[in-house]
Amino acid sequence: MNQDLKANECIVLQQDPDAIIPDGYENIVNVSQLQQVKAAAKDYGQIIRDRLRSKTGLTAYLGRAGIEMTFSNKVPDLFDKLIKQIGNPYWLIRQKAPQIMDAHRTATLLEEFLFDAFPQVGEHFGLDQSHKTTINAYRRLMSKLSEEIGKIRIKEQMQQINEDIFGAYFPGEQKIEIYWIAIALFSESIDVPIEEFTKVVLTHEFAHGFTHVGSDLGHNRWDTVKFCKAEEALKEGLAQYYTATITKEMRDRANYSSDKIDAYSAYERLLDYQPAIYHTHKAWLEHDEKLICEAIRFAILEARKLDQKCTHEIFSEMVVNNLQRLS
């Protein structure tokens, strides 16, 4: 029975076009990572949408009548270029950076402890010069790999990419695409669980969808042409603001411990790798949480009514005016 189930699961997986790994990626990703991304979306997608509905005061649906969501094995061009520029061997090393760094520190501590600081401990366990030579060689190998990792300037290169590469929202189609390969590769390279990183991507992309097609009490939406013309710094700022506040809210409602990497940790780590356009929300986070949330909500309603192109500067003025009115 179990064997039949596993066989059927394999057939389904083989028929899933998202599970077909593109050429050049066979050795650095696997289909189990796709399943992790899909599982996270299934478990947390509704939670994220409910919290966006509460924060924005807007209503958006998933499915034919609202926002469609698909998973894709497409690797966005700029991320694909980065992967190929680094090369698979280097990318594989970069993925294991945290473990390599830990191994180097451990080997250094062992060498210093057993043979320099307290040689009597090593002698007690029968360690001799051959063991020291082995540990020393291991430490030097880890040191060499650490140096190679340091040469991979992934942060600087990522900061040059001014577009979403882990997921994308298409206003004309009211569709979200989740790029599981980019999520799998990058989350591992910054030592963040795929599930937590997926929450960040889902929140960001759904936030785009909510600000665009989420309907207010009067059943109004942001006109698609006007939304597309709005400044990217504004659209990304709004998506980032809701990503920050919702993942922070998730943390506050959970039994968080400082040694746990959660969705808010993933958001913070990703932010270090993102260009300036993804940092335009940070000034909003400095205000009282409840007041700024309301001020932004009212500003979204105002921005939708503008005849002119809405910029981040214009929107920020609306937010300030709303803050003054609410205080």
Image (spheres, grey):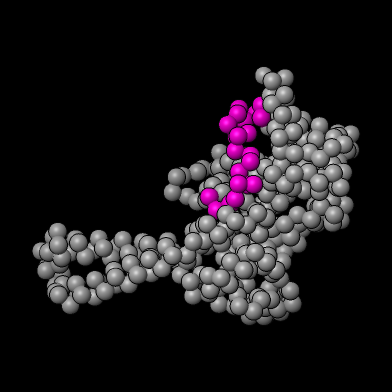
Residue 126 in which image quadrant: bottom left
Q: Residue at x 37, y 62 (%)?
A: 101
With respect to residue 131, does 208 lie above or below?
A: above
Residue 184 x, y percent position in the rendering: 59, 64
Quarter of the image where the N terminus is located: bottom right
Q: Is 143 situated left or right of 159 in this image?
A: left
Tell me, yes or no, whether the highlighted magenta stretch contains residue 281: yes
Q: Is 76 situated left or right of 140 in this image?
A: right
Residue 172 in which image quadrant: bottom right
Q: Which residue is drawn at 19% across and 72% down?
A: 132
Q: Which residue is drawn at 69% across and 69% down?
A: 73
Tell me, yes or no, whether the highlighted magenta stretch contains residue 265: no
With respect to residue 277, does 12 lie above or below?
A: below
Residue 257 x, y percent position in the rendering: 46, 44
**Could one spot residue 63 in this view of the protein?**
no
Give the residues in magenta: 272-292
Residue 145 x, y percent position in the rendering: 38, 69
Residue 147 x, y percent position in the rendering: 38, 66
